[in-house]
Amino acid sequence: MKKLTALFLALAMSLSLVACSNGGGGSATPTPQNSGAPNEPDKKLKAALVLDGPIDDGGWNADCYNGLVRCQDELGYEITVSENVAQSDYVSAAREYAAAGYDLVILPGNQFQDAAIEICEEFPDVHFAGINFSFTADNVSAMAFNDLQSGFMAGAFAALMSETGAVGYIGGTEIQSIVDAEAGFMQGAKYINPDITTVSSMTGSWSDVAKGKELALAQISTSNVDVIFGFASACNSGMIAACKEQGRKYIAEPLDILDSEPGVIIGSVLEKNSELIVIIAEMVALEVTEGQSIVGDLSNGILAYGAFGDEVSDEVRSRLDEVIAGLSDGSIKVEPAA
């Protein structure tokens, strides 16, 4: 537990943490309600993950599951996961785990926010953690990414690798994180090449693989897009398939999956869901009971580029280093979506 406490303190110093209670503001770092060690050191903590898709989507859900497994391996949690949960079952799935005495229920996506709002007061001793939530409470934490930054990183990368002068973004549903990433992508591409053509589409889904492929093929055929950045969970695999068929390039997120399709996937923008989940699990283990608002960005290492393919030249890598430096020191400004 001493190691856990040290990890938490390091994270508290490096992350942008804002403690919130019932949606209000709080101190800059979370405040444990005790000395930093749990009152019941022998208690087996339990964490549950609720997903609206499969854990093997190669992206969002997969990385969330990686975080859950790390809770088990690094922090000693007993873990369980529910996959492919229908929207009509979000509340019942979360409530079932809470009623069963789970200490932490992880809800990775804005689509789960209403479920958390509905049941959080019913289970005051259970901590609910949501990714891309805009809501916090005494026992609800909101985790998010600076998607303007991640989108900008992808857009700059795409523009540097494009030979046709046209690049594409394909998001899932039009929630704030996806809209922000879209805005960042457009600005990043234009930062590299003001004359580049940027195309954007939305699948309206997180799991419709066929729709992801359809939209990617449409961007390729109608706008001659040769680099696509997908931000739509399981739909991304359809985009990758389209790029492979048509000889185009693809930038992945949130995992580094370069080796899965070398020559098609040229790199990744990492948004480390797993890191955010472990941070929340550490807080729960240390009995930090107030809900937190946690934003992962370049400053705390939650955003980063993954490995690059062999086709990415040293010159391109150097330009991307400059982009990272500019975003980090504020010399590159990314404007919010209109």
Image: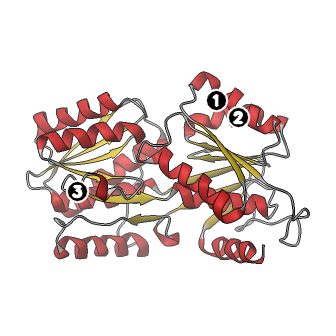
Which image quadrant is residue 87 in? top right
In the picture of the structure, the residue carrying the numbered disc 3 is 262
**Mark 2 and mark 3: Cα distance apart in space:** 38 Å
Q: Position of residue 162 (x, y in %)?
A: 14, 56
- Name the residue rendered at 56%, 35% in the picture: 83
In the picture of the structure, the residue carrying the numbered disc 1 is 90
Q: Quadrant of the N terminus?
A: bottom right
Q: Is residue 201 visible?
A: yes
Colouring mode (rainbow / by chain / secondary structure / one colour)? secondary structure
| Helix, strand or loop under label 2 | helix
**Mark 3 and mark 1: Cα distance apart in space:** 37 Å
Seen in the picture, residue 173 relative to 68 is either above or below; the reply is above
Q: In this view of the protein, which residue sits in the foreground, 2 or 185? A: 2
Q: Position of residue 203 (x, y in %)?
A: 35, 31
Q: Quadrant of the C terminus?
A: top left
The mark that comes first in sequence, 2 or 3, is 2
Q: Position of residue 261 (x, y in %)?
A: 25, 52
